[in-house]
Image (spheres, rainbow, N blue to C red):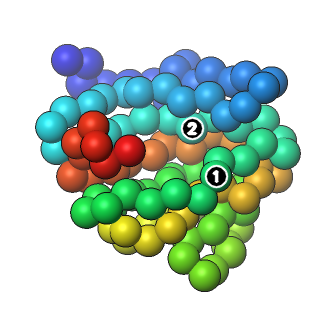
Amino acid sequence: MTLVHNVAAAARFSSDKLAKVTLHASGSMLLGLNCLESGQSQPVHAHAGADKFYYVCSGRARFVVGAETVEAGAGEVVVCPAGEPHGIEQALERTTLLVGIAPWKEESK
């Protein structure tokens, strides 16, 4: 198991759609990166029984959490309570997000 990850070095981008990079996955937590080019998005979805956060490492994006739409930039975190619909409406520039979901089970997707 890798204990230390360099987020900037692990980031991967795709011109087609947001890129996902798994940093750690266990029976209790998923930690990964969502890497988006400007204009890319992630459909609204929910994780039953699992809280999620998006920590903006770099860039800026607009997020949907429940009935709210919020913008967040580097150094800010967006919290998505368990079962609450959420997604990335649009990356406003090239953006790297550290994403955590817990508790994590494969069916939490």
User: What kind of residue is marked 2?
Assistant: Asn
Which disc, if any, is residue 65?
Answer: none
Left or right: 28 as drawn, with respect to 65:
left
Counting other residues with Cα less than 10 Å from the Cα at mark 2, is it few (<14), some (14-19), or many (20 or more)?
many
The number of discs equals 2
| x 62%, y 21%: residue | 12
| x 31%, y 61%: residue | 48
Of the pair 13 and 16, the residue shown nearer to us: 16
Counting other residues with Cα less than 10 Å from the Cα at mark 1, is it few (<14), some (14-19), or many (20 or more)?
few
Left or right: 77 as drawn, with respect to 59:
left
Of the pair 107 and 57, the residue shown nearer to us: 107
Q: Residue 18 at what x, y percent from top left?
A: 67, 34
Q: Secondary structure at mark 2?
A: strand
For this orientation, the residue located farthest to the front is: 107
Which one is closest to the eye, mark 1 or mark 2? 1
For this orientation, the residue located farthest to the left is: 27
Task: Please tell me whether residue 76 is drawn above or below residue 59 in the rendered image.
Answer: below
Q: Decide: marks 1, 2 in contact (CB < 8 A)?
A: no
**Quick one: quadrant of the N terminus?**
top left
Q: Residue 14 at what x, y percent from top left?
A: 73, 22
Q: Secondary structure at mark 1?
A: strand
| x 82%, y 52%: residue | 92
Task: Please tell me whether residue 52 is drawn above or below residue 96 in the rendered image.
Answer: below
Q: According to the image, label 1 marks what residue?
A: 43
User: What kind of residue is marked 1?
Assistant: Pro
Q: According to the image, label 2 marks what residue?
A: 34
Task: Please tell me whether residue 18 is drawn above or below residue 52 in the rendered image.
Answer: above
Task: Please tell me whether residue 19 is drawn above or below residue 91 in the rendered image.
Answer: above
Q: Residue 35 at what x, y percent from top left?
A: 63, 34
Residue 58 visible in the displayed image: no
